[in-house]
Image (cartoon, grey):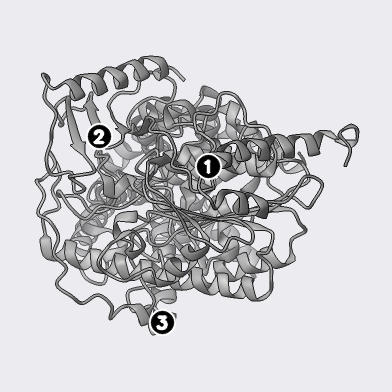
Amino acid sequence: MTLQKFLSSRFPPGRDLVQVFLVCAFPVAVWSWIIFFYDLPSFLLSLRLSQIINIFAYLQVIVLIESALLFALDTLLAVLLPPRLFLSNYVPQSTLFILALAFWAVGFHLNSEQIALGNLPSNPTLLYIWTVVWAVVFLVLSILTRYWTRWNTLILSFVDRLSIVSGVYLFFPLLSLPYVLLRYVVLQVS
Amino acid sequence: MSPSSLNRRDFLKLAGLASLSVVGASGSPLAGSLLDMLPKAGAQPPNFLVVVFDALSARNMSLYGYPRANTPNLERFTSRSIVFHQHHASGNFTSPGTGSLLLGVYPWKHRSLQHHAQALERYSDQNLFSLLPQEYFRFAYTQNPFAFTLLDQFRKHIDRLPKMADLADYSALLSDKYFQSDYYLAAETELVALKQESHQPASLFLSFLDQWRIARANTRINQAYRKAYPLGLTNCRSENPGTQCFELEKAIDWTVAQVQNTSQPYFGYVHFFPPHAPYNPRADFIGLFDDNLRIPKKPLFPGASYTNTKALKLHRQHYDQSIAHLDSEFGRMLVTLDQAGALDNTVVIFTSDHGEMFERGFLGHETPALFEPVTHIPLLISLPGQQERLDIELPTSAVDVLPTLLSLAGATVPSDIEGSVLALDGTQPAVRNIYMMEAKSAPKRGQLTPATFALLQWPFKLIQYTGYEDIPDAYELFDLKSDLEELNNLYSPDDPTSIALAEELSQKLEQVQSP
C-alpha cells in the first residue's frame, strides 16, 4: 500500500473534519473570551479602545492557531491509531478526546499555583492524579460510545449544536487574522 | 565668537549654561571651577551616560551610610561627583519611576501607573530623548520589560535600541524577539494569552507549552551557569513568565562598547535589572555580609503578610550582595572607560527608578506604601573633568533629572515640566515640595484612586492613603531629620504642621487629578 493510499484510507471524511475542527475551536475560544472579559476592566483602566481591539484581534489569532494545533493532534491520532480505536467512530471519539483534554486543562489552570509545570519535579502528585482522573473518564466514555448507541447519538447531536455556536465564535478569529497580518505588514513597512 | 554669529544651537547652549551660572554665582567657592569644566558654546557639547540600576534603595548602600560596605567603587566615584543625599523616586515601581525620570513630570501627569503601562500619548514626542538637540546620537538599553515599554514608546527618538533578547542569554518574551514593530500590544497580548502572573492565561493549551519552554530553558541556563551563579543567573526563574536570563557583565560590556564607538555627542540610557529580585549575585559575592546586622523593628503595615524574619534577613543579605556585585561592575565599567579616556567629555549620571523594602511585612517594592526604603534612591552626577566631591543634602526628585540634563545639553526645557534644574555647584536647593505616588490600580485617565501620595517638605514627609479597600484612609507624618526610620507617626488633626501639609497636598491633588 502506498503512503497516499494509506493516508486516504485513514483520513476522516471532510464533513467530519470540519465538525471536529469546530469542536476544537469551542473550548479554546470560550476560555479565551472568559479570560479576556476577566481582564477587560484592567484594560479599560490603562488602554485606549483601539488598543483593546488590537489585543483582542491578536488573541483571536492565537485562538485560531491553538484550535488548528489541537485539530492537527486529533487528526494525527486518527491517522496513526488502528482504525477500530479512533477512525471508525471518529466524531464521537474526537469530541470526547478534545473535551476531556479541555477539562483537564481548565482544571490545571484553575489550580495552577498547586500544579504549575515549573514545580513538576518537586510536586507532581496533584498533576498526576488530575491527569489519571481525566484519562480514566475519557477511556470510560470512549468505550461507552462503542456499546451504547444512545450515548453515541447524544454526542453526535451535541456536536451538531456545538458546531453552530463554535461557527459564531470562529467568525472573530477569521476576521482577526487578515487584520493582524495587514497590521503587521504595515508596521514592518513603516 | 561674535554675538551675530550665534546660531540657534549655540544660543540654546548659552541659555542652558547661563542658568547654571546664575546658580553658581551664589554658590560655593567651587562653583566657578566646576562650571568652567562644562563645554563652552561652540565647543563639543557634553556626552551623557545615564546608568540606572533597578530597585536600588539608597538605604541599602554604604555610600549613604548603610553599615554593610557594599559600594566601595561608587564611593570612589563620589570623589568626582555631586552626591545627592535625599534623592527620591516618584513612584515605587518601574513604570512610574522610570516615567518620571525620562519625562520630568510626576506620575499623575505622565500616567504610566500600571504594570507595562506607557505614558500618555503626548509624551511620545516630549521625553528626554526627543528634547535633546538633534546632533546627539541616542542609544538605550534595558533588561526590564516595564522600562522597555517606555523606551518602545520613545523609539522613534532613539537611534539605537536593541531588543532585550539581544543581550540576554535567554528571553522568554516572544514579542521582544519577533514583534518589535508592534511591541507594546504584542507584549500585552502575550502576557494575557501565555504569561499571566495573577490569574489564568487566555490560551488553554499553548500556555502549557510556553511554561514548559521557559522552565526548560531556565533549568538549562542555570545549570550552565551554576558555578558562576549558584543562586541562578540574574533574573532567570521559571516562576517569572516574562523572564530574561542575562549576565550583567555582558550588558556592561555592551555599554562600554557603545561609549567607545558611538559618534559624539551621544546620549546613552542604560537601565540594568539588578539588584531587582530575584537577588542572584555572582558567586564571588555570596559569602559577603554574613553578619548580625541589627534591623530596627517596625510595625506591620495593614494587610502586609511577609513576616518570616529569617527569610527577610536572607533576602536582604542577597540583595546587599547584589548591590556589591553591581557596584563592582559599575567600577569595572568606569575603569575601562577612564583608561580609554572615553569619559573626558561625558556627564555620568548614576541613579535608580525606585527602591526596595525588607520590613513592615513587605518584601520587594510592589506595595501601597511609600516609605523611604522604596522611594529614597541614589543620584550621583559626575561632570566632565570634575575632581571634587560635592554633597547636596536637601531633597531632590527624579523629575529634576530631565531638566538638569537638558540644561547641560543646552536644550530648551518645556514649560510644563514639573522638575527643577539642579544646581551642580554644591549650592543646596531651596526647600520645596517633592512628591511621590503609587496608583497602579487607578485608571489611566480618571481620578487617582485608590492611591498613596507622599509630600516631602524637608524635613517632614506626609503620606496619604486614599480609596483602598483594605487600608483605611489616613495620613502619616514623619520627621525624616530626627526619625530616619519613619517609626514615629506625628500626624494629628490638631497639629499645625499636619494641617498645613495635608492642605498643601490636597490642593496639589485637586490640580492634578485629571491628566
Residue B363, quarter of picture = bottom left
Mark identifier at residue B226:
none
Q: Which residue is mark 1?
A: B423
Q: Nearer the viewer, residue B443 or B87?
A: B87
Q: CA distance from mark 1 to mark 2?
A: 22 Å
Q: Are marks 1 and 2 on the same chain?
A: yes
Residue B229, quarter of picture = bottom left
Instruction: Give the image location of residue B23, x and y in percent.
Output: 56, 38
Q: Residues within 10 Å of mark 3 (few under 14, many from 20)?
A: some
| Helix, strand or loop for disc 3 | loop
| Helix, strand or loop for disc 2 | strand
> Upstream in the sequence, badge 1 or badge 3?
3
**Res. B425 in view:** yes
Q: Which residue is mark 3?
A: B228
Q: Amino acid at mark 3?
A: Ala
Q: What is the chain identity of the residue bearing mark 3?
A: B
Kindly identify the residue that appears in the image at 70 percent across and 34 percent down: B15
Residue B479, quarter of picture = top left
Q: What is the chain identity of the residue bearing mark 1?
A: B
> Upstream in the sequence, badge 1 or badge 2?
1
Q: Which residue is mark 2?
A: B460
Q: Amino acid at mark 1?
A: Ala
> Upstream in the sequence, badge 3 or badge 2?
3
Q: Amino acid at mark 2?
A: Phe
Instruction: Give the image location of residue A6, x and y in percent.
Output: 58, 65
> Please, which residue is most extreme toward the bottom here?
B227
Instruction: Give the image location of residue B138, x and y in percent.
Output: 69, 50
Please indicate whether residue B365 sits to the left or right of residue B384 in the image.
left
Please indicate whether residue B337 sits to the left or right of residue A152 in the image.
right
Q: Quadrant of the N terminus of chain A?
A: bottom right
Task: Assess whether mark 2 and mark 1 are in contact (beta carbons under 8 angstroms).
Answer: no
